[in-house]
Image (cartoon, rainbow, N blue to C red):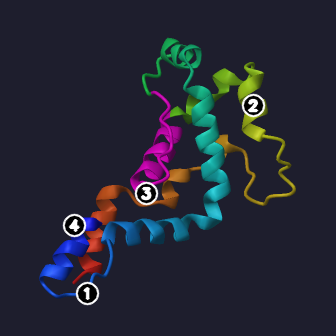
Amino acid sequence: HGSQQAISRRISVPSIGCADHRFNLAVRKCLEPQVYLIKKVSALMKKLKTVKRVAKLKLHGCYYKPIPLHELRWSGCYRVLKRFEDLQPRIHLFMDDCTVEDDESDGDDSTTNPNAENLRRILLVDLIPSPSEQRKSSRYSTK
């Protein structure tokens, strides 16, 4: 950010801001209706990241590890949702692990929030284009 301002002063061109930052803000705005689901997936990923739960996934042939959500990176949201899709067939392994189920709900009632659907049935990655798809679309929008 500071180097952009220095360059804009040297070449006497007004600074228009960081394109990556504006893009990240635009992606956040587009995802606002799904924030509730994204936060639920993120909370579930945090719960699944313990050593015992990762070992349980490995024991059942799943070598994917849960990954945390990096809110400052739009691609991080895509990665978390994609990883959730990869882990989704094995979420049933934690039905007897009541802390995951209890913490996943966080006391929210599904009747109070229309997006409070069962996480095991949602294809969330379709909500966001992949980073490579975003690069392709940004090439067309900048021309």
For the point 43% across and 49% down, the residue is 76
Q: Is residue 38 above or below residue 138?
A: above
Amino acid type at mark 3:
Trp
What is the distance, in whole Å, between disc 2 and disc 1 at their CAs?
52 Å
- Whether residue 46 is in magenta: the answer is no
Q: Name the residue tied to disc 3.
A: 74
What separation in Å lies between label 4 and label 2 (alpha carbons)?
47 Å
State left or right for residue 74 relative to residue 39: left
Instruction: Give the class, few, some or many, for how many residues have Cα within 10 Å of label 2's Cα (few <14, many ≥20).
Output: some
Residue 71 magenta-highlighted? yes
Residue to which mark 2 is pinned: 101
> SS class of the residue under badge 1?
loop
Q: Give the alpha-carbon distance from disc 2 to disc 3, as whole Å.
A: 27 Å
Residue at numbered disc 1: 14
The mark nearer the N terminus, 1 or 4, is 4
Q: Which residues are magenta?
A: 65-86
Q: Quarter-wise, where is residue 134 in the image? A: bottom left
- Would residue 106 appear left or right of 86 to someone viewing this image? right
